[in-house]
Image (cartoon, grey):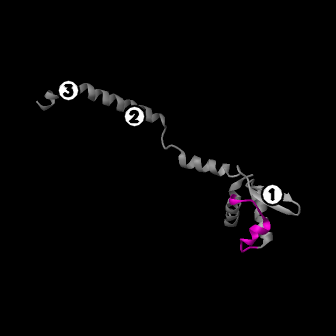
């Protein structure tokens, strides 16, 4: 169940947008696209096979809905690529220690009598 190839097609991405708003039948989805109903069905089959959409049969109709966790692999990849630190976070610990040490040294070196500062 790899969602990435299924997301490559703009028609399938639009179908996902529509299904994110609410579940729908093939006929409803086809009415909103300039392609045929069988073509919409084929796109939906790809989305179902990729684990992005579920299909439930109600009598003679199939109702399609977005699968809540279907996009998790995509989210994980985006998080990995965009939130990866460019350096080791432990480097900040050393910087913090050095800043504290410098502030302490400046406080210790500062004159305690305000008259000494002007002299």
Q: In the rendered image, which quarter is residue 64 located in?
A: bottom right
In the picture of the structure, the residue carrying the numbered disc 1 is 55
- In the image, residue 8 sits, relative to residue 75, either above or below, namely below
In the picture of the structure, the residue carrying the numbered disc 3 is 111
Q: What element carries label 3?
A: loop
Q: Between tags 1 and 2, which lies in front? A: 1
Circle 2 crowding by C-alpha within 10 Å: few under 14, some 14–19, many from 20:
few
**Does the magenta segment cover residue 23?**
yes
Distance of mark 1 from mark 2, alpha carbons? Answer: 55 Å
Stretch in magenta: 20-35
Judging depth in this view, the residue of 96 and 14 nearest the camera is 14
* Among numbered discs 3 and 2, the one appearing first in the sequence: 2
Residue 104 in the figure: left or right of residue 48 = left
Residue 14 image offset from top left, x and y in percent: 67, 64
Residue shown at 77% from the left, 69% from the top: 39
Farthest residue in the left direction? Answer: 119
* Among numbered discs 1 and 3, the one appearing first in the sequence: 1
Residue 11 in the figure: left or right of residue 59 = left
Disc number for residue 95 = 2
Residue shown at 89% from the left, 61% from the top: 59
Residue 41 image offset from top left, x and y in percent: 79, 66
Judging depth in this view, the residue of 77 and 66 nearest the camera is 66
Quarter of the image that includes the C terminus: top left
Residue 103 image offset from top left, x and y in percent: 31, 30
Q: Between tags 3 and 2, which lies in front? A: 3
**Does the magenta segment cover residue 59?**
no
Residue shown at 85% from the left, 63% from the top: 61
Distance of mark 1 from mark 3, alpha carbons? Answer: 77 Å
């Amino acid at each position: 169940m790899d969602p990435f190839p299924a997301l490559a097609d703009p028609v399938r991405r639009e179908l996902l947008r529509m299904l994110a708003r609410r579940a729908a039948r093939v006929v409803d989805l086809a009415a909103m696209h300039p392609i045929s109903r069988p073509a919409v069905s084929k796109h939906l089959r790809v989305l179902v096979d990729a684990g992005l959409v579920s299909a439930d049969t109600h009598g003679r109709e199939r109702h399609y809905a977005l699968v809540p966790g279907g996009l998790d692999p995509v989210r994980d990849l985006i998080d990995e690529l965009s939130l990866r630190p460019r350096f080791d976070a432990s480097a900040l610990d050393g910087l913090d220690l050095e800043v504290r040490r410098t502030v302490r040294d400046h406080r210790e070196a500062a004159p305690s009598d305000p008259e000494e500062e002007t002299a």
